[in-house]
Image: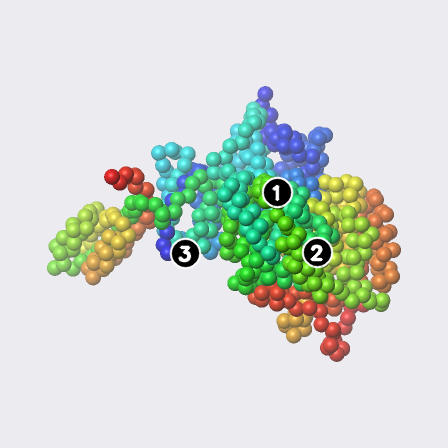
Amino acid sequence: MRHTISVLVENKFGVLSRVSGLFSGRGFNIESLSVGETIDRSVSLMTIVTTGDDQIVEQITKQLNKLIDVIKVVDFMDVDHVEREMVLIKVAPRKNDKSEFLKLAEIFRGRIVDSGPATFTVEITGDEKKIAAFIELVRPYGIKEFVRTGKVAIAREGVKKT
Amino acid sequence: MKISGAEILIECLKREGVKHIFGYPGGVVLNIFDVLYDEKDIELILTRHEQGAVHAADGYARASGKTGVCIVTSGPGATNTVTGIATASMDSVPLVVFSGQVPTMLIGNDAFQEADIVGITRPCTKHNYLVKDINDLARTVREAFHIASTGRPGPVLIDLPKDVTTGTAEFKWPEQVSIRGYNPTYHGNKWMIRQAAQMIAKSKKPVIMAGGGVILSGAAKELRELAEIAEIPVTTTLMGLGGFPGSHKLSMGMLGMHGTYYANKAVQDADLLIGIGVRFDDRVTGRTSAFAPGAKIIHIDIDPTSIRKNVRVDLPVVGDVKNVLRDILKVIREQKGQWEAVRKSWLKQIDAWKKEKPLSYTFDKKIIKPEFVVEKIYEISKGKAVICTEVGQNQMWAAQFYKYDEPRKWLSSGGLGTMGYGFPAAIGAQIACPGKLVVDIAGDGSIQMNIQELATAVVNRLPVKVAILNNGYLGMVRQWQELFFRERYSHTRLDTVPDFVKVAEAYGAVGLRAVKPSEVEPVIREAFSIKDRPVFMDFIVDWREKVFPMVPAGAAIDEMIFDEEEKKPAKKLKAVK
Ligand SMILES: Cc1cc2nc3c(=O)[nH]c(=O)nc-3n(C[C@H](O)[C@H](O)[C@H](O)COP(=O)(O)OP(=O)(O)OC[C@H]3O[C@@H](n4cnc5c(N)ncnc54)[C@H](O)[C@@H]3O)c2cc1C
Ligand SMILES: Cc1ncc(C[n+]2csc(CCOP(=O)(O)OP(=O)(O)O)c2C)c(N)n1
Ligand SMILES: [Mg+2]
């Protein structure tokens, strides 16, 4: 099972290597990891996507919690939440395909952030499904490279059912 | 008034109640050592190797329950501590290790004697620090001692760049420590505790499996009460030895790979297994899928990661053993169970197993059996000694044939299995317990891994006794080669080199030797009578002797093999005399 885990950590040097070292040292899998500061400058938030069965993911969250510099761990599996990832994709469509490609990007609310004589760079944001779908669709147009930020996630504000 | 970082450091140590430090000097810690030169309240014990310093601090900590402290220099001094730190980490021993570091300006430049010790020790410390600002020093030391000694204890390293200890600042001692990411759970969940008590009451065939956590928590008394009130037989892990009296009628000794027949049988046949401060190590469980097949498992542990790491658990209770047992006891006392009647047939069954296959060996009149030496040490010390061990067969015989009735009398590297641990640990233990008899039960291989510490023991007039079970082999490995590698003794033969008596004498210690069984007792008695210096006892033992019972790798723990009569004809290899 794939889990998205958010880890609130002290904003100190070395914390990233404590977390990544924990994963490599214990043979846990990291699919993506993103880090950034939060409103409170003294803490950072990491979003980690990992896979494993229940027992492994239980160990992962417990081991993360055990790190002294980790303040809070949330496994979004059991939490209603929003996930987003951003990808920059450089595509080199043939002349005849250009307009079709641009339309496709538009449908996915992609933004062209750079273009050259033969390439377009598209910025696309979305959840896992949307990004996977977009990449599949543009593949035939000739992807030169792409980079992804890794996923970030945030819990939804609880809406009371009436 | 401003004082130097080195002075701040020593002031902090005093406030933490530190009396002894184990260490070794070098360039970047010179000024710390300079402050220690005038220091009256803290004694630094100079070991002869940094690994020895850490093991000594570890032995000090295990024997006394206090936090062990080390100071070493940067680079090679720091890297030499790694095995000691990893040893302490695996066995949850509270240590604070200070390493010198090159000045902050030079960090990362491959400066002289620079090593990224914070990076190197990250996975084998509970936590570690690089102090970059002298104003953080006192708080960091305070935090380090707090982290090392609370929750599940463990080693903490503080890396001290030279400019931090040579600089000056006001001394400010933080009265409170608060670390928002660190809040161990000390009290068990009330509902879980009631559940646990009910499961105990319902069980017909319960077994308590007690481990290192009982000793770390200081809960031997509570454990004994629970076992006695509810009539539950107790087995301990290697790390739990002494957590429950080994000579108690409810004791089944150690379980696991070299555990007793009856302990392993009982666990496999139990309907309830109560794991108390244990981490279900693979040496204990054997093949996990076949472990305690009929039992519901209750697991009490302060560290949530220990729970369900290796085995399924039916009822987890996170908390400190002492608190949890007290709470369980309260409920159990209310139950007023007819324990004796309920447990009668189970305890009878266990007695039958005890009689069927007790721990045993065949005494020989001509050649010394290593088990005999351990038994004699037990007898002559009246079970009162602090026993340290090296690693290998010596360690297993020391676990099997000496009965540990009290906690902190058994100091052995269980998790990492570090050869060379026992002797420096014995030095630390002797410093922690000046009047007590401290014995290192050693192998001829292991003792050579930190033999230089003879100098430390001699100079400090420490009457540590080392009983070398000299089998001329890396015996435990040889045993595996004999059983599983067709007696191909690849690189495990040591011969009786060196002459340990002469080595001891060269260092100014006493060396004694026993070759015949009749010499064993006089040698031990003479050694125990020496009070002003260390003694090496060189016991030339039967090299063929193996540790039994034994659970082969990958087997269930009741699939034990035992000592068969030696049927094979003359060995191809020459026996060590
Ligand atoms: C050659 C060799 C052979 C070995 N053979 C065996 C064998 O046959 N049998 C055997 O048992 N071992 C054997 N060992 C040792 C084994 O490797 C482990 O070290 C040992 O089994 C671990 O013991 P433990 O489970 O008690 O855990 P420890 O390592 O002592 O861990 C303590 C546990 O208690 C918890 N704890 C700590 N403090 C508290 C507290 N205050 N409250 C609650 N919980 C707490 C910790 O979180 C941890 O889970 C062998 C080792 C060697 C080197
Ligand atoms: C530092 C280290 N290196 C290697 C090992 C592997 N090992 C485990 S037991 C053993 C043999 C120990 O020999 P000795 O000290 O003579 O003890 P014996 O088994 O003969 O009693 C070895 C090499 C280890 N545990 N530690
Ligand atoms: Mg040997």
Q: Chain of mark 3?
A: A
Q: To which residue does mark 3 refer?
A: A52
Task: Decide: few, some or many residues near mark 3? Use Cα within 10 Å; few <14, some 14-19, many ≥20.
Answer: some
What colouring method underlies this structural image? rainbow
Q: Amino acid at mark 2?
A: Ala
Figure quadrant of residue B364: bottom right
| Mark 3, secondary structure of its residue | loop
The residue to which callout 1 is attached is B333
Image quarter hosting the C terminus of chain B: bottom right
- CB within 8 Å, label 3 to label 2: no
Residue B12 on image: x %, y %? 61, 30
Mark 2 vs mark 1, CA separation in Å: 33 Å
Q: Which residue is mark 2?
A: B399
Mark number, residue B25:
none
Cβ of mark 3 under 8 Å from ligand 1: the answer is no
- The picture places residue B162, in percent across and down from the top left corner, at 57, 36
Q: Is residue B354 above or below residue B450?
A: below
Q: CA distance from mark 1 to mark 3?
A: 43 Å
**Mark 1 belongs to which subunit?**
B
- Sooner in the amino-acid sequence: mark 2 or mark 1: 1
Helix, strand or loop at disc 2?
A: helix
User: Going 73% across and 63% down the picture, which residue do you hit?
Assistant: B355
Q: What separation in Å lies between label 3 and label 2 (alpha carbons)?
A: 38 Å
